[in-house]
Amino acid sequence: MELRHLRYFLAVATAQNFTKAADTLHVSQPSLSVQIRDLEEELGTRLFDRLGRTIALTQAGILFRDHAERALREVEQAAQLIRELDGAQRGRLVVGTLATVNSYLIPPLVSQFKQRFPGVHLQVHSQPSAEIVAGLMANRLDLGLCLLPVPEAQLTAIPLFDEQLVLVAPARHRLPQSRLRMKDLGGLPLVLMPADYCLRKMVEEECAQARVTTKVVLEMTSPEGILQAVAEGAGLTILPELYVRQRLAHSNLRMIDLYDPVPRHSVGLAYRMNRYQNLASKEFGTLCRSIMANLLAQPASPRFRQATAGSRRP
Amino acid sequence: MELRHLRYFLAVATAQNFTKAADTLHVSQPSLSVQIRDLEEELGTRLFDRLGRTIALTQAGILFRDHAERALREVEQAAQLIRELDGAQRGRLVVGTLATVNSYLIPPLVSQFKQRFPGVHLQVHSQPSAEIVAGLMANRLDLGLCLLPVPEAQLTAIPLFDEQLVLVAPARHRLPQSRLRMKDLGGLPLVLMPADYCLRKMVEEECAQARVTTKVVLEMTSPEGILQAVAEGAGLTILPELYVRQRLAHSNLRMIDLYDPVPRHSVGLAYRMNRYQNLASKEFGTLCRSIMANLLAQPASPRFRQATAGSRRP
DNA sequence: AGTTCCTATAGGTAATAGCTATATTGGTTT
DNA sequence: AAACCAATATAGCTATTACCTATAGGAACT
């Protein structure tokens, strides 16, 4: 049995007439008759009584009509829901993002996304880069904002932007400079993430290249907590500039540019290769780029700034 | 889209693997792949993410799976219900029957039928023959027990038996005979059905052929009521022997055979030509015949019998 | 009886679901 | 890396079948 049989059957049941039903189905009457005969043979019973000029549904026919209608309705509804899904009128999008990126990119992104796609259920998980990668591989995540390069060949990563890492110090710290050479980091007390975090690894690599030995006095996982510890004088830290920039206002902190070389890392949008990306997913990526363009277009603000400084905008 | 696509899709979704799904479906893997591709094209979306060695349902795929399962369940359930219908495990049978036949044939028939087919809803309408014919023509009735010949070419009628008509008189009526010539009916006061009833017409025809003028003193539609009127002395009546036979016990009535000629009429099982007869319907006919054979096999009892006579069995 | 209005059947054709063979592509192993 | 596995996709052919036209057969209505 095929859906064709159901469609033909319902057309005949509705038209009460093979010839008219064949017209509406745009097939010839004999084709229709044969298909109905085949259906009746498969079911082992007559569905219509051919009573000369009129036809009537048998008991089996009446029973079958209800079920055929429901079956076809299910199929049509599925097609409709999928259209809505692909039109991003519904669905779910699960995104993993780095805690730092989360703080400056996600708020405006979520706001714009929900406005454009109110029917889509968006879920954002703030996770370390490695977990994002694992989540993408395990299909727990649809998209991930993580550090590049991504260590899995199975993931496609689209570079979004470079984050510059800056040194963060208490506002009244004795360091006089607005800029600091990498090699001058040596001996300074640092508050960093634990060793398995990408940001920590990145910092250590940079320091190693600059032949500097770091002195980690405190490890914390949350960048928020790290900044607080620094403000309270536990030491200094190194975090992405865009992240820190938003946290300076009303804090007791200041940013100090590192150079020679300038430490940077790349953030990209990653997703599992070959995975179907629906409209909501694609648009999420587009929004990422446009919002980042906005953020980066803001004036490259002076790196030294009083902790009491107000808005970043001139 | 056809049910094939749904079946194939569900097989892949269950097996999580095209090759294994193809095996269980007994088709080749490429055939399956092509069908899934066609389905995805028709829906305009991917249903599976081909992730190298494994596959996973997309959001659309998850959504589609639910609907596809429901659609197929509907179709299977319809087939199952129809099998039960044709196995007479369920269904409805609407039968029209003559009031006289109703009284002696239907009670044992219903009893046996309900025992064999407890799931079938049996509905018996006691109606004049003309209404039975009309009911069959209008598809209100599945079967009819009516007088032969049936006046509609569109109805098939299977003769079941002949009913002999007998004169019924009060037990102490002055008529001395156990038998009466048709022509001797002349002048006797009769209680009969109205003129549009077949039984009345039949009596009148018989009388006309016997060149006898009837004197109808009372018209009633129900044979039950007629017998009561006769018992109360309103007159005599002419009714089927099998019907009267069952009513004599504990009544004040006696039967008088009519002869020269013996008035008879035929009763048959009628149904609309070309109408599908399911098992319940066919078995109803078979039961009719076997029960009638039983009734007719009872000893041809003497036609003259005291109203106070007990059981018919010796 | 003739005519009309249906559905069923017959026979041929075109569309297509299926097959085998093979390419291609991730993932694993050496 | 290179070679190898395991899985799906593609190509080309074949068998099936849904469809068509023409026509037969039957009931209903002049």
Image (cartoon, coloured by chain):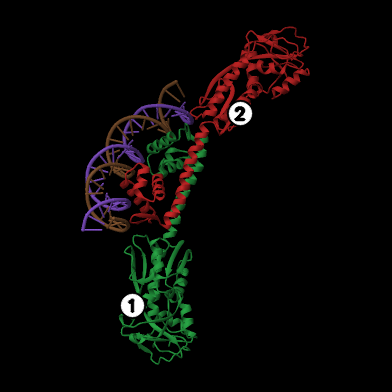
Chain colours: A red, B green, C purple, D brown
Relative to the observer, which residue lies in front, C21 or B230?
B230
Same subunit, labels 1 and 2: the answer reads no
Say which residue appears at 62% left-offset and 29% top-offset.
Answer: A124
The disc at residue B295 is: none
Q: Is residue B20 visible?
A: yes
Residue A288 lies, with reference to residue B278, above or below; the image says above
Question: How many residues crowd mark 2 within 10 Å: few (<14), some (14–19), many (20+)?
Answer: few
Q: Secondary structure at mark 2?
A: helix
Relative to the observer, which residue lies in front, B6 or B268?
B268
Which residue has dot 1 on it? B205
Which residue has dot 2 on it? A114
Residue B8's x, y, as percent? 43, 41
Residue A166 lies, with reference to residue A18, above or below; the image says above
Q: Which quadrant does the C terminus of chain A fall into?
A: top right
Residue A61's x, y, as percent? 42, 54
Residue type at tag 1: Glu
Q: Quadrant of residue B80?
A: bottom left
Residue A208 lies, with reference to residue A2, above or below; the image says above
Relative to the observer, which residue lies in front, B230 or A280?
B230
Residue type at tag 2: Lys
Mark 1 and mark 2 residues within 8 Å of each other at the beta carbon: no
Q: Is residue A234 visible?
A: no
Q: Quadrant of residue A304?
A: top right
Q: Is residue A130 left or right of residue D8?
A: right
Say which residue appears at 38% left-offset and 83% top-offset.
Answer: B166
Q: Separation of disc 1 and disc 2 at Cα?
A: 89 Å
Q: Secondary structure at mark 1?
A: helix
Say which residue appears at 48% left-offset and 64% top-offset.
Answer: B121
Question: How many residues crowd mark 1 within 10 Å: few (<14), some (14–19), many (20+)?
Answer: some
Residue A55's x, y, as percent? 37, 54
Q: Nearest to the eye among marks 1 and 2: give it.
A: 1
